[in-house]
Image (spheres, rainbow, N blue to C red):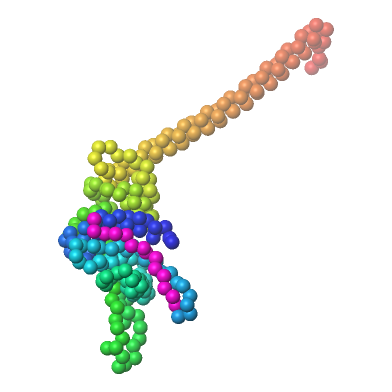
């Protein structure tokens, strides 16, 4: 399992985030699915192939939605950062496994529908197929007999501002980031309070490659709940201070290096002065000896 998959699942596994995504994208912002009505569902399912071999499939996030006397519905989320041309096959496999599990559950008193939605975080538009019939060539005369299977892909970076405002959980911060980056190539953080700070920052760091979000995990905020604006401002300030400290250290190192060079030159001059003084002392001694013995050299 890749790092991106792990951080996506960690954030979306929170019931408030999961229900918010479904409400915002499927129910147009209506608070239809309550976080208290969700129960975690095993994301791994097993099935036997024709040869009897046991195979296992895993989907990103899946939960049961219970609402009073309404039958249980299974809501699944699939995360994509790149277009996957096999996504319709993948989704029908996941959904088929979910229906199969109901068939094998002898204690179940009823059957419930299965819904899977694909969250696409890429900036280029989704270019892959959205249905089985887009993937296969059907011989003439069989079109009406081959059942189609459509998938629901939501391109997060292409949500409108009004759609982003439909989210009430931390997913609004995530959606806002991808929309801003797609439209403006830059990001102005909001002052919206973050509930699941660690999960959001890890998600943003891995998905964007921006190390500021990882650095932000070390920032401690005071007062009310932290928000992205406050966190990144403190990270920037820490970065500026770090830059100042580095420049100061580099300046001190340069000064120390110059002082070392000067000290080395002074030591060399002192050595020369010492050598000159020694030679002058030897010369003076020689003159004294010549004078004592009245030795005069002819010109």
Where residue 215 sits in the image (x, y, percent)?
38, 45
- Work out whether 289 lies above or below 61: above
- Work out whether 55 lies above or below 215: below
Q: Where is the C terminus found, in terms of image quarters?
A: top right
Asked whether 236 or 294 is in front, the reply is 236
Q: Residue at x 25, y 43 (%)?
A: 225
Question: Is residue 149 inside the magenta stretch?
Answer: no
Asked whether 186 or 165 is in front, the reply is 165
Q: Residue at x 80, y 6 (%)?
A: 292
Where residue 221 sits in the image (x, y, percent)?
30, 39
- The magenta segment is 36-49
Residue 272 in view, yes or no: yes
Asked whether 238 or 3 is in front, the reply is 3
- Work out whether 142 lies above or below 262: below
Q: Residue at x 35, y 86 (%)?
A: 137
Total residue callouts: 0
Q: Residue furthest front?
A: 107
Where residue 55 sits in the image (x, y, percent)?
45, 72
Q: Where is the N terminus found, in terms of image quarters?
A: bottom left
Question: Is residue 46 inside the magenta stretch?
Answer: yes
State the image quarter where residue 183 is shown.
Answer: bottom left
State the image quarter where residue 27 is shown.
Answer: bottom left
- Work out whether 221 lies above or below 212: above
Horizontal arrangement in the rendering, residue 44 relative to residue 63 (left or right): right
Q: Residue at x 30, y 66 (%)?
A: 76
Where residue 170 sits in the image (x, y, percent)?
26, 53
């Amino acid at each position: 399992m890749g790092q991106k998959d792990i951080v996506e699942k960690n954030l979306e596994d929170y019931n408030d985030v999961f229900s918010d995504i479904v409400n915002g994208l499927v129910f147009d912002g209506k608070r239809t699915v309550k976080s208290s009505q969700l129960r975690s569902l095993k994301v791994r399912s097993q099935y036997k192939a024709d040869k009897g071999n046991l195979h296992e499939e895993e989907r990103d996030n899946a939960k049961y939605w219970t609402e009073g006397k309404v039958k249980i519905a299974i809501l699944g989320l699939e995360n994509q950062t790149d277009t996957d041309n096999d996504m319709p096959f993948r989704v029908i496999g996941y959904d088929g496994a979910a229906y199969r599990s109901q068939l094998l559950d002898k204690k179940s008193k009823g059957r419930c529908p299965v819904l899977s939605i694909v969250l696409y975080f890429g900036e280029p538009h989704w270019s892959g197929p959205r249905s089985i019939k887009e993937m296969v060539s059907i011989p003439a005369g069989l079109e009406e007999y081959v059942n189609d299977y459509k998938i629901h892909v939501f391109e997060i970076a292409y949500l409108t501002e009004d759609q982003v405002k439909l989210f009430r959980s931390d997913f609004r911060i995530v959606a806002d980031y991808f929309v801003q980056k797609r439209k403006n190539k830059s990001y102005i953080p909001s002052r919206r309070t973050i509930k699941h700070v660690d999960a959001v920052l890890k998600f943003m760091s891995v998905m964007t490659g921006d190390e500021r979000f990882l650095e932000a995990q070390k920032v401690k905020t005071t007062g009310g709940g932290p928000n992205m604006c406050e966190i990144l401002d403190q990270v920037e300030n820490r970065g500026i201070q770090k830059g100042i400290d580095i420049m100061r250290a580099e300046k001190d190192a340069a000064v120390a290096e110059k002082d070392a060079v000067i000290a080395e030159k002074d030591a060399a001059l002192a050595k020369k002065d010492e050598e000159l003084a020694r030679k002058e002392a030897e010369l003076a001694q020689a003159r004294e000896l010549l004078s004592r013995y009245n030795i005069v050299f002819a010109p």
